[in-house]
Amino acid sequence: MFGFGKGKVEIQLEKFNFKPGETITGTVKLLLKKPVQARQLRVVFYGIQNTRNTGISLAGSNNCRVGSNNYRNRNNSSVVHKFEMSLDGEKEYAGGEYPFSINIPASLLDRGAKPDGALGTALQAAQFLSGSVTSLKWFVESSLDMPMGLDISKKVQVNITL
């Protein structure tokens, strides 16, 4: 959010590509126009899994035309991992830099892992044919929690791969 001109938060990371078991290291920079009272400065590492189910429903019709009322498209988002840490507590913030380190769990991508080989390929094909598409995105977000207004925040996407 913009915080109505109170300032902004920047996140500087050493790199953007990580593997499970590595550490995300960076700095949160507060760039404020004037000192502000806030509850907390925090950084959060989290993953969002988006699933889009697209298909054709045959219920109530002998017609399967795309674009008709029989076409369905559902999106579902869920948080698959979330780690939050406080960088500083309640006080008057005037700006500054706050270093942080977040350890990525070694088993982070094991959730929902698909089998290797022919069985894994068959599962992927079944998902494709059913119209189900899943994406997983990872973010580092920092926010200054303001008691009487919108928080000042910044979100940066990172890549987590095996």
Image (tube, rainbow, N blue to C red):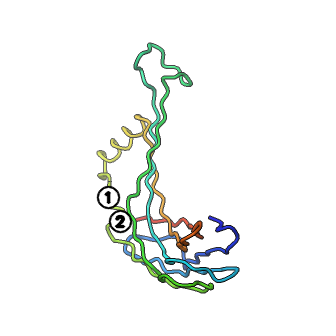
Q: In which quadrant of the rendered image does the C terminus lie?
A: bottom left
Q: What's the distance in space between the residues labelled 1 and 2, CA to CA?
A: 7 Å
- Residue denoted by label 2: 108
Amino acid identity at mark 1:
Arg
- Image x and y of residue 147, in percent: 53, 71
For image coordinates 52% across by 69% down, the residue present is 141
Q: Quadrant of residue 149?
A: bottom right
Q: In which quadrant of the rendered image does the N terminus lie?
A: bottom right
Amino acid identity at mark 2:
Leu
- Image x and y of residue 124, in percent: 38, 44
For the residues labelled 1 and 2, say whether their Cβ atoms are less than 8 Å apart. Answer: yes
Q: Is residue 151 above or below residue 126?
A: below
For image coordinates 55% across by 79% down, the residue present is 14
Count of all numbered marks drawn on residues in the image: 2
Q: Nearer the viewer, residue 153 or 121?
A: 153
Seen as rendered, the residue at the extreme front is 148
For image coordinates 32% across by 58% down, the residue present is 111
Q: Is residue 48 above or below residue 76?
A: below
Q: Residues within 10 Å of mark 1 (few under 14, many from 20)?
A: few
Q: Nearer the viewer, residue 141 or 24?
A: 141
Q: Is residue 3 left or right of residue 124?
A: right
Q: Residues within 10 Å of mark 2 (few under 14, many from 20)?
A: some
- Residue denoted by label 1: 111
Q: Secondary structure at mark 1?
A: loop
Q: Nearer the viewer, residue 9 or 70?
A: 9
- Image x and y of residue 88, in percent: 48, 83
Using the image, tell me which numbered label, if any, was put on residue 159: none
